[in-house]
Structures are given as C-alpha cells and as structure tokens.
Amino acid sequence: MDLFGMFRRQSAPAEQPNASYQDADGGVLIETSQDIEDAIRIGMTGSTSGVAVTPHSAMQVSAVYACVRVISGAVANLPLHIKRRVSDNTREDAADASLWRVLRRKPNGWQTPSQFRRQMQAQILLRGNAYALIAWSRDRVVSLVPLDPDRMVVAQADDGEVKYEYTRKSGSRINLPSREVFHLVGMTLDGVHGVSPITFARETIGLSMAQERHGSTTFKNSARPSMVLQHPGKLGKEGLEFLRSSLDAYRSGGESEGKALILEEGMNTAPLSMTAEDAQWIESRKFSRSDIAMFFGVPPHMIGDTEKSTSWGTGIEQQSIGFVTYTLEDHLTTWEETINRDLIPESEADMYARFNRAALVRGDIKTRWEAYVKGLQWGVISPDEVRALEDLNPRSDGEGMQFYDPPNTAGGDQGGQNEP
C-alpha cells in the first residue's frame, strides 16, 4: 500500500459527520449528559463571560499564544536522538535506522522535523491530542502525516483495544488501526483522550478576551477623554454647537495640531486621573495573564510578565532548569515514550528515542564551556567528544580521545600532570 492508500480505503459510504463532530472553529462535541448540561449552561458562547472560546480564538490572547509558542518551540528545537543499546553500558546513534531519517531529516513530503514537532505539540496544548498517520514499509517507518485532531474519534473497546475513526474533508470516514496512528496524549483523565488547558481554562481565557474587547471598544469610541472642559455657568445650545465645532477643528490635525486651545466665557480645563475602576480593570487583566500561564505550567516571566514575579535563580541556565523540571520534562517524556511505543517495532526493541536536554543552554556560551571544562577535569568526557558537541572535527594529533584523571584522586603530587 502506498503512502496515501489508507485515505483511499473507506470503511463506510461517504456521508456527513454526525452531531458529535467538532470542527476547528468551535463546534461543540456532545458525548455525555454532562456535555449537554454544560452546553445549556454556557449557551452558544462557550463561556459565561459571553465570549466564544475555541482553540483558534484563544490564540488571539497574548498569554495563550506565548505559552503555546514557548512550549512548542522548545520541543521543536531540542535535538531528538534515536539511540541503540549495544550492551548494558554502551549506547550508539542508530543513524542507519529509517526512523532516524524520518524524525531527524524528513517526516513527510513537505515538513521539516521542527515544523512537524511544533505542529504536533501545539495541537496537544490546544486540543489535548495530536495524531499522525504512520506509513509502514514492512517494519520500517517511511513517513508521518499529521491528522486533524478535530476529525478524529477515539474509542476503547472492552478488551482494551483502542480504535480510531477519521473523518475526511469529503465527509467520508475511515477506520485506522492503532498500528497506523501515532497518538500523542496530553493530560488525560481516562487514559485514552487527552484534555486541553483550553477546556478547563475556558472561563479565564473568555474573561481575558472580554476585557480586551472592552478596552478596544473604549479606545475606539473615545470613551475615556484626557481632560474635561468646565464652564462657570450654563452653556446654551448655540454656544455648545460652536464649542463642538471648534473642538472638532482642533482635533482634526494638520495645521491645527500642536496649537493652543482658546476657551471663552471663563471656561477652563481639568485633567482626568485614573479612577479606581480603571486600576481594577488593569489589575484584573494582569491576574488573567498569570492565571493562563498557570494553566499551561509556564512561569509568568517567560511570557513577559515580570511584575511581582521571581524566577529560579539568575541567568538563562537556571531559568531553563526550572522550566525543564516543572513543565517541559512532562512533554518530552510523552514524546519519547510515544515514539518508543508507536514507531519502534518489537524487532528493534534495543532502540529508543531521547531528547538532548543539555541543548537548552546552547545559547549561553559561558555556561556551556564551564560545563565542558568540569567534564574534562573529572574524566567524564574527552576533548574529541567536546569538539563533536560543538560540531568540530577531532584533533589531528590523535590525542583527542584521552580521558584525564580526576584532580586530587591519583595519589600524591603529580606536578600538575592530571590537569588538562
């Protein structure tokens, strides 16, 4: 069967998706009585704030976009290695495996590895699940084709087998065996279906969108004047019309811009300061931003919210360690275990996938080289291994594979012979 043979095989005649189908623009998925109750409670808006919250509309909120960008970008840019266990203590790169080429060079006919991983990770964050069609050639993975998660229905039989039904754009459906689906699951409550932060953060995101729309409407309609004009008496209709025309000419720009405003009949101006309601609105927007970051597990300072916030130490290394430990490690482990389960056959059980977490500090040259020096001093790595990490050729004198003895462990004074 060729690459897209699975899409040409239909399990049922072409028909339109049923009511449980959920499109990318906010269609409601009704599967249980609780779904019906929630749909009636929030109406057709998607949230009690009166704003429809969908994965697409949520990305228009800066905090949501920043969280998705930070996490999916980290997963996309970290080097992903395919290793092979040679013995209990020896590992080597499985560069001869077809999976190496798929995950590191060309997952399909139009995407790069980073594009593929970024798309899949963004789908996990926005929809809770990410799917890709696996094209096999015997026991070799040939390509991975991303599938729209909104068109996939996943069901688990009583015997534990997971079945997939995919609705194509034409409306026809096909059944996909689990062997042909690469399924990344986010946080899950039943072990099969992932749940998205958008689902449980719907009210918080809806509130943020409503606040943003309120602010935009306020500025659009000029509902917040910068000053007020005070008249000692009562301004008649004719005087009011004259004043309005004068103010319109003053605000029209052009030659009048920058000139002074002339007031008559004892009028004066008074500036308007920020009211308590204005301050509360700004604070509520800041709270919504931090709350959204909490749902995604991203520290607020990593999405630009540095006010009243602390980070894990100073420097990019400490911040990266905290982000990796408390958030990114969960996503990286999901990728590694899913690759091992879905893409590596039993005949290649000695292979496994592994992200290089150390690459997170590659932008900090000082920290990176300090780690190299410590590794050399303690005999953990050799000079040629350091050069390989920096994409440099081995030493020409043949001394690059020497491992230095750890300091103060060789016994006696060696006159500095143990120092690299």
Image (tube, rainbow, N blue to C red):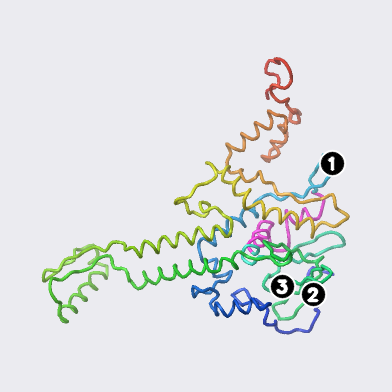
Q: Is residue 111 magenta?
A: yes
Mark 2 or 1 closer to N-term?
1
Which residue position holds label 2?
175
Q: Which residue is mark 1?
A: 88
Give the structural element (helix, strand or loop) at label 1: loop
Closer to the camera in the image, 302 or 330: 330
**Count of numbered tags:** 3
Of marks 2 and 3, which one's residue comes earlier in the chain? 3
Where's the N terminus, which quadrant? bottom right
**Identity of the residue drawn at 66% across and 39% down:** 390
Query: Helix, strand or loop at disc 3?
Result: strand
Q: Secondary structure at mark 2?
A: strand
Task: Give the side of residue 159 with respect to residue 409, left or right.
Answer: right
Residue 121: image x %, image y %?
A: 65, 60
Look at the numbered discs 3 and 1 and tell me whether their residues touch, using CB distance below 8 Å: no
Crowding at mark 3 (Cα within 10 Å: few <14, some 14-19, many 20+): many
Q: Is residue 199 left or right of residue 411?
A: left
Dot 2 and dot 3 residues touching (CB under 8 Å): no
Distance of label 2 from label 1 (alpha carbons): 40 Å
| Residue at the spot 76% in from the left edge and 31% down from the top edge | 401
Residue 152 circle label? 3
Q: Amino acid at mark 2?
A: Asn
Image position of 70 with respect to 217: above or below: above
Image quadrant in which you'd find residue 172 = bottom right
Distance of mark 3 from mark 1, alpha carbons? Answer: 40 Å
Q: Amino acid at mark 1?
A: Asp
The stretch of residues the image draws in magenta is 95-122
Q: Nearer the viewer, residue 215 or 141?
A: 215
Whole-percent x and y of residue 119? 65, 62
